[in-house]
Image (cartoon, rainbow, N blue to C red):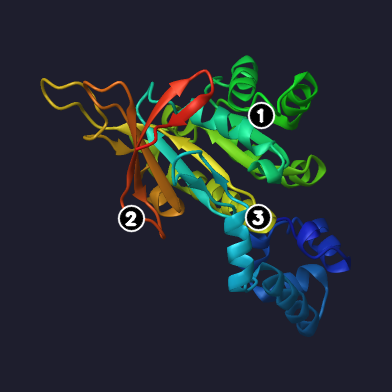
Amino acid sequence: MAGRRLKRLIPGHFADLCESKNIKTVQDLIERPDLDIIDALDISVGDLASALRKVYATLAPKPRTAFNMLDAEMSSLTFESSKVRIEPGIITEVVGAAGVGKSQWCTTLSAMAYLPIEYGGLGGGVIYVDTESSFSPSRLVEIARSRYPKFYDVKALKKLTQSIHVFQCSHAHELVDQITQLDATIIEKQIKMIIVDSMASPFRSDFDSKHIPERQMMLSIAASKLKYLGETYRIPIVVTNQVSGGMKKGLADDGENLTAALGITWAHAVNVRYRLQNKPGKESMECLVSKSPCSARLSFQYSIANAGLIFNEK
């Protein structure tokens, strides 16, 4: 919220004056002493108070009725044969070690999101922020064609690929800059979901242990903007995360002894966390609901197939 531009928030004469004096964001405005602003803009105390009221009124969260919340739940994405649901307006994190299907999860969701609402989709496009160069358009087409053969004919597949807008960011500052500039794309392209795969990769490669405070500050900016986008446009935000920690001696890495990367600051920003892990000796893998405000600690078996992520019926 602090990084929002005043010209977008309260367009008009006051915002133009602020822009001319290098007061461009909400943070610039609220951190500067009132007397300095009055002197710099040559305005009265009353004018400043009126402008601040407009800013605070615009930023304040609007109340929602139970009906609105129920309607939002009904517009979520649900994997077939499971209770794994991707809700709008919140950050859903998929965390796990390499090779457990995090990118497969994201690609499957991309194919699901474009489906019309009556087919269980969201009826719109996807912003896919790819930080590991792992997005594969051919894999997207394979999943869509295998999962929904009756809907995805040649024409629908073309429209699907045109509706997935991929941004590639290899560094943390590029990722944060991209996230803060997504408003226009969401509106222009009728975006119904944002995917970041992965959040951890650029932050872990760009910051060592000596620069943790700077990393956490940038993570906070990214998390705040993602939450704003999800709440404002009522769309799901899905991010993947890596894990950290060592393997148990003498045992294969099943993921149970690993913790999500990026620390406490990021963990608090996540609303729902699904943890993916291998189960030694079993053909399928396990998805664990490790954080949720409305679900018990459940687990589901899944596998990776031509049709993407498949949850196994119990």
Q: Earlier in the sequence, mark 3 or mark 1?
A: 1
Q: Earlier in the sequence, mark 1 or mark 2?
A: 1
Vertical comparison of 158 with 277: above or below: above
| CA neighbours of label 1 inside 10 A, class few (<14), some (14 to 19), many (20+) | some
**Residue wearing tag 2:** 296
**Residue drawn at 69 percent across, 76 percent down:** 35
- Who is closer to the viewer here, 17 or 172? 172
Q: Where in the figure is residue 108, as x and y percent of width and height?
A: 56, 30
Residue farthest toward the top in the current orientation of the protein: 138
Left-right relation of 272 to 168: left
Q: Where in the figure is residue 208, as x and y percent of width and height?
A: 37, 32
| CA neighbours of label 3 inside 10 A, class few (<14), some (14 to 19), many (20+) | some
- Who is closer to the viewer here, 132 or 118? 118
**Residue wearing tag 3:** 234
Q: Earlier in the sequence, mark 2 or mark 3?
A: 3
For the residue marked with disc 2, what is the amino acid?
Ala
Left-right relation of 115 to 202: right
For the residue marked with disc 1, what is the amino acid?
Phe
Left-right relation of 162 to 75: right
Gap between marks 3 and 1 measured at Cα: 21 Å
**Residue drawn at 67 percent across, 58 percent down:** 232
Gap between marks 2 and 3 measured at Cα: 24 Å
| Residue 167 tag number | 1
Q: Where in the figure is residue 248, as x and y percent of width and height?
A: 14, 27
**Badge 2 element:** loop
| Residue 277 tag number | none
Residue farthest toward the left in the current orientation of the protein: 250
**Badge 1 element:** strand
